[in-house]
Structures are given as structure tokens and as C-alpha cells.
Image: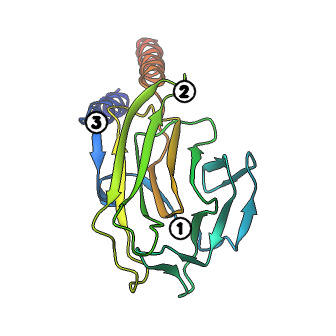
Amino acid sequence: MNKINLIAGLLLAVTAAGANAAGTINSLADVPASSVVLNFENEDGHVFASGASYSFGGASFVADQQITVGQSVFDLGENGLWGGNGNHFLSFDNVGAMTLDVSFNGLKTKGFAFDFSAWQELGSTTPATISVSYFDAANSLIGTHSETISPSLGWENYNLSLSTGYVSDSANIARVSITGDGVVLDNLTFTQAVPEPESYAMLLAGLGLMGVVARRRQRR
């Protein structure tokens, strides 16, 4: 019984820890542990047309225009250059705004963040902006925010980036939509999928039943 009580206590503690306030984050380190990091280093320039799906590392990617997974170099205009140093990343290849959907193979996550930059025309004073939206399994909006690179990162710079993301109040993020023009992404970081509260309740009920059976056996 002591072991069962200990396990039940740990499960309740995990459930309580999931009650952190929701909101936008600006650091990969703010994604709740335990987290998965996808850095595209083992992807080598795979080009995917509109609507094509690609999965690796526990995430799936679908875009409404062409993307390159494992891009090695990308000109961002006023925001400099990404790549050229052996680093691989994901790039939006379309001229104009496009959207990338990231999902988690039917599972849900509590937090999601990534490093990014975006193309800005040389000489332009209009900053580059991306929009990010988070949806649950029923496709209901959980949260949304926009990030602007202002001032520009500088055309002479290499591999400069910002970080952004979102933490929900529970593990209910099933899909993330990222919209922008000439966006590059790296180090996608998300919390490992965990059972929903209903699953915890079922497990606790099962542990309670085990305790009853153990007591009956002791009486015999």
C-alpha cells in the first residue's frame, strides 16, 4: 500500500504542476520539461510542395506553399543570411505570405517554441512579422500572437534569430500554425506528450482497485 500511495501522490503532483498560467514566451528554456528539440541537422534539403506532409521527431509538417526541410543557406535581405556554416533549418520558399502547420502525430503538447527569422526587402523600413496560432484537437483556438523583427537584424549579419512560443494551461495543443513571408525556423521545442487528466483519473482508479485487492489478500 505504501508504494501505491506514493505513486498516487506523484501523479497528483504532476497534474498540479500542469496548472501553470498560459501565455506567450520568448525563450526556448521556458517550454515546460521534459521537452523535445528538433534542429533539422539530419535533414538534407528535402523539398515539399503545397499540401505534402513530412514527419520526424514526433512532429508533422504541412504547408500551403513549398518548404525546404534541412535548408542550408537562405537570404533574408535586411535580416542577413541564415546558414552557410553547415547548420540546417526549415525555410518558407514562397514569395509572399504562407502558412506552415505543425502537429504532433495525434498527440497534444503543453508548450511549443522555436527560433526564427524572416525575409525583409533590402532598404525597406517595413519590419518582418510572423503570426502564430495554437489549436486544440477540436480545432478551437487556444491562443495567438504576432512577432515583429524591428529594427531589422542587419543585412551584413549571419544566423541571427529571435525566439517565440506559447505555453498552455494544460497539454491541449494539437496543432500550431505559423504564417509569414520568407520565414526560417530552427530548434523547434515542445513538451513531450502526456496523458490527459482523464487518463490520470483512470490510472488512479486502477491503483485504488489494486489497493482493495491487496487488502483482501492480506486478510486471507
What percent of the width, then of the height, locates residue 26? 29, 56
In-image side of 148 versus 218 (left or right): left
Residue shown at the point (73%, 67%) measured from the top left: 46
Q: How many marks?
A: 3
Which residue matches tag 2? Answer: 137
Give the amino acid type for the residue marked by disc 3 in the picture.
Ala
Which residue matches tag 1? Answer: 39
What percent of the width, then of the height, locates residue 193? 50, 41
Give the amino acid type for the residue marked by disc 1 in the picture.
Asn
Q: Residues within 10 Å of mark 1 (few under 14, many from 20)?
A: many
Residue shown at the point (43%, 52%) measured from the top left: 130
Using the numbered discs, state the Cα–Cα distance from disc 2 to disc 1 in whole angstroms.
25 Å
Chain-order first, disc 3 or disc 1 = 3
Secondary structure beneath dot 3 equals: loop
Chain-order first, disc 2 or disc 1 = 1
- Quarter of the figure that contains the N terminus: top left
Secondary structure beneath dot 2 equals: loop
Residue shown at the point (34%, 52%) measured from the top left: 147
- Extreme residue in the left direction: 21
Say which of 121 and 180 sits in front.
121
Residue shown at the point (58%, 75%) measured from the top left: 88
Give the amino acid type for the residue marked by disc 2 in the picture.
Ala
Using the numbered discs, state the Cα–Cα distance from disc 3 to disc 2 in whole angstroms.
17 Å
Which residue matches tag 3? Answer: 22
Say which of 27 and 155 sits in front.
155
Q: Is residue 180 above or below residue 212?
A: below
Say which of 22 and 214 sits in front.
22
In-image side of 16 versus 216 (left or right): left
